[in-house]
Image (cartoon, rainbow, N blue to C red):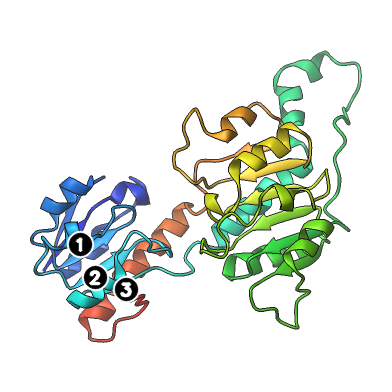
Amino acid sequence: MNIVILDYITLGEDLDLSPACKFGNVIKYPTSTQDEAKERVKDADVIIVNKVKMCPDVLVNAPNLKLICETATGYDNIDLEYCKMRGITVCNTPAYSTYCVAQVTVAMASYLMTCLGEYRDFVHSGEYSMSASANMLKPVYHEFYGRTWGIIGFGNIGKAVYDVAKALGCNVIVNKRQPVSEFECVSLDDLLKKSDIISIHCPLTDETRGMIGEKEIALMKNDAIVINVARGAVWDENAMAEAILNKKIGGLGCDVYASEPFRENHPFSKILDKKNVCLTPHMAWGAFETRTRCFNTVVSNIEAFLNGCPKNIVN
């Protein structure tokens, strides 16, 4: 059996990929362009992929292909209809990043709530050593306790953030597609109006694309902290940048972008120097343990498929 990994660099160079070798011959590439992928899949029985588009133009060159394993929860890079027509099984890796994304969400919120960057800079610059006071308390920062944390999207990650926010003493409100009685579920407009911290954890769909724009920002408190660890296209990036520049919100944290990596002409390039902004390079999913869990799920998916009981099928 030939297993082809088309872009292993997306899992990190430090990850041990050898567990897949027990199934057969593993051929791995750090990255693959679409043209390179066409050639590289020719003898593949199984493809392991993250970002490379699995479209008919590529897959038509893989006559022996039986299984595609996505090293992510999302699988919009794979043409599911074509795979179904060809009898190619497609599996994803659900729920592997819950703890890590929740951790980074809370870290961003804490960084922005406590103005931690500014206090760190005060000490590291040497200003603290030269000051006459034992402490500095500017800029003013606030406790989480008693604040309202609004969570948009309430899957595994949203629920993990809920638990931490409650532990910090926050009143937590939730916006989800299908409200449930055991949580305080509210409309999106109500959540935006009431929340001091807003974190976004919903998938990107036709319904959620661009769901936060100028109209929605106008509903927010002018000191609200807004964090997006979902998908870049769920909000209007230009409108969010303008909200920071015009002081319509209190802070912005983001790990995901509509185009990655974002270039110099991206709206967020205008706010890189703002102290109330925390931008990270789509890393919130990628702790070592998380990536290991992800690849172990891929190995488990291959094993289940070979045993005749495939799991995590998305097509």
**Residue at left offset 91%, top offset 16%:** 132
Q: Is residue 230 among what the camera can see? A: yes
**Label 3 secondary element:** helix
Q: Is residue 257 above or below residue 20?
A: above
Residue under label 2, please give it: 82
Residue 151 position within the rendered picture, expressed as x and y whole percent measured from the top left: 70, 62
Asked if residue 307 lies left or right of residue 147, the reply is left
Q: Are marks 1 and 2 in contact (CB under 8 Å)?
A: yes
Q: Quadrant of residue 79?
A: bottom left
Give SS at disc 1: helix
Could you give the CA–CA distance between mark 1 and mark 3, rounded to whole angstroms? 26 Å
At 68% from the left and 42% from the top, the residue drawn is: 252
Who is closer to the viewer here, 132 or 38? 38
Inter-mark Cα distance, 1 to 2 = 7 Å
In the picture shown, does residue 19 fall above or below 181? above
**Which numbered circle lies on residue 56?**
1
Q: Amino acid at mark 1?
A: Pro
- The residue to which callout 3 is attached is 300
In the rendered image, the quadrant that contains the N terminus is bottom left
